[in-house]
Image: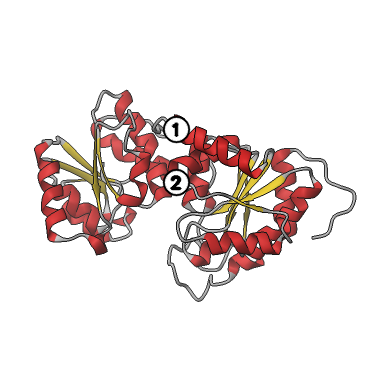
Amino acid sequence: MVRLSSIGDVAHTLPALAALRRAGWEAGWLVETPAAPLLEKNPAVARVHVVPRARSLGPGALRSTLRELRAERYDVALDFQGLWKSALWARFSGAPRVIGFSSSWRREPLSALLATEGASPTSEAVHVIDKNLALLRGLGIDQVGLREFPLPPTPAEAETVRKGLTALRIGGFVMLNPGGGWDSKLWPPENYGVVARALRDRGLQALATFGPGEEPLADRVVRASEGIAVRCFPTTLLEYMELCRDTRLVVAADTGPLHLASAIGAPVLGLFGPTDPDRNGPFSSDDKVVRRVPLCSPCHKRRCRIHEGVMSSITPSEVIRAIDVRLGLTVPEARAV
């Protein structure tokens, strides 16, 4: 299985791993470093091949990983990513069969030339999870619709999170995650601060979470909330998963933290703009989405003059109403937004 990045995309590929295991296949996975914790010690993965991101990949690491891959003598390589880099890894793995999406389903269409077999998902594969599952039809596996997310056991992480929450004296909390993706998909931290104040009126605490290097975003949430939101302690990817198990709700944009929370089964509220929630968003019928649709939608460009700033037009009032609906809360008689 070749799905190198990102964290959310790796999470969306986990049901394909579950389907392979159900069908009796033994699966290895080639992944870049940031998402590797989701696969290392994961009982559903027989072998994890971790490589640096492409810009940090030197000749030595390249040769070493190729030797690792070929030593496993894989029968099939599945390219779930649809890029030149993923197609090259799949082809150079030494597997006699390389199955990838046909050119019209790839972000880099010409990379389909490196596959020995192409796949074109049918119309029911709307969500990217189902697109990934459809790739398995070349192996005689039809599990479109499966929502099973094999993840590693995390007892140590659960204890770390328990101690961290106790130290913060926080419980009955909502996670507000202002980061986790490219800027034009993110909702302003100051708006999360307004939401934190509304949560207090509902008897809930707001926990501002962050990934590596995103502490300033969490601090902006806390400042905008006038100190009502609590900045979370630093967490690893697996510790973040444990936070998701304890929370009342996760509020985040179309980012890895949102998708990982959905995979865990946490209640979520997704904030969307340039990307399509039908393709990337929460898949539970109970979860909610607040969205602004720019003229370029769906757009996966990190920089786009058409959708630039569209997320800022989502108002805190809309998000607070969606939180009320998702959690079944009684709306206070008076509230300041």
Residue type at numbered disc 2: Thr
Picture residue at 29% right of the left edge, 51% below the top: 32
Distance from disc 2 to disc 1, alpha carbons, whole Å, reads 12 Å
Q: Tell me the residue that label 1 is attached to.
A: 156
- Quadrant of the frame with the N terminus: top left
Instruction: Please rate how many residues cluster around mark 1, counting C-alpha atoms within 10 Å: few if below 14, some from 14 to 19, many from 20.
Output: few
Q: Looking at the image, is 1 positioned above or below residue 302? A: above
Q: Tell me the residue that label 2 is attached to.
A: 236
Res. 318 image quadrant: bottom right
> Of residues 312 and 216, which is closer to you in this image?
216
* Residue 9 in view in this figure: yes
Q: Looking at the image, is 88 positioned above or below residue 249? A: below
Q: Looking at the image, is 55 positioned above or below residue 280? A: below
Picture residue at 69% right of the left edge, 59% below the top: 193
- Camera-side mark, 2 or 1: 1
> Of residues 307 and 164, which is closer to you in this image?
164
In percent of width and height, residue 138 lies at 25, 36
Instruction: Please rate how many residues cluster around mark 2, counting C-alpha atoms within 10 Å: few if below 14, some from 14 to 19, many from 20.
Output: few
Res. 145 image quadrant: top left
* Residue 123 in view in this figure: no
Residue 275: mark in rendering? none
Picture residue at 56% right of the left edge, 37% below the top: 163
> Of residues 34 and 295, which is closer to you in this image?
34
Residue type at numbered disc 1: Ala
Residue found at the very far right of the displayed protein = 333
In percent of width and height, residue 194 lies at 73, 59
- Quadrant of the frame with the C terminus: bottom right
> Of residues 23 and 9, which is closer to you in this image?
9
Q: Seen in the image, is 91 located left or right of residue 104?
A: left
Q: Look at the numbered disc 2 and give the secondary structure of its residue.
A: loop
Picture residue at 55% right of the left edge, 49% below the top: 233
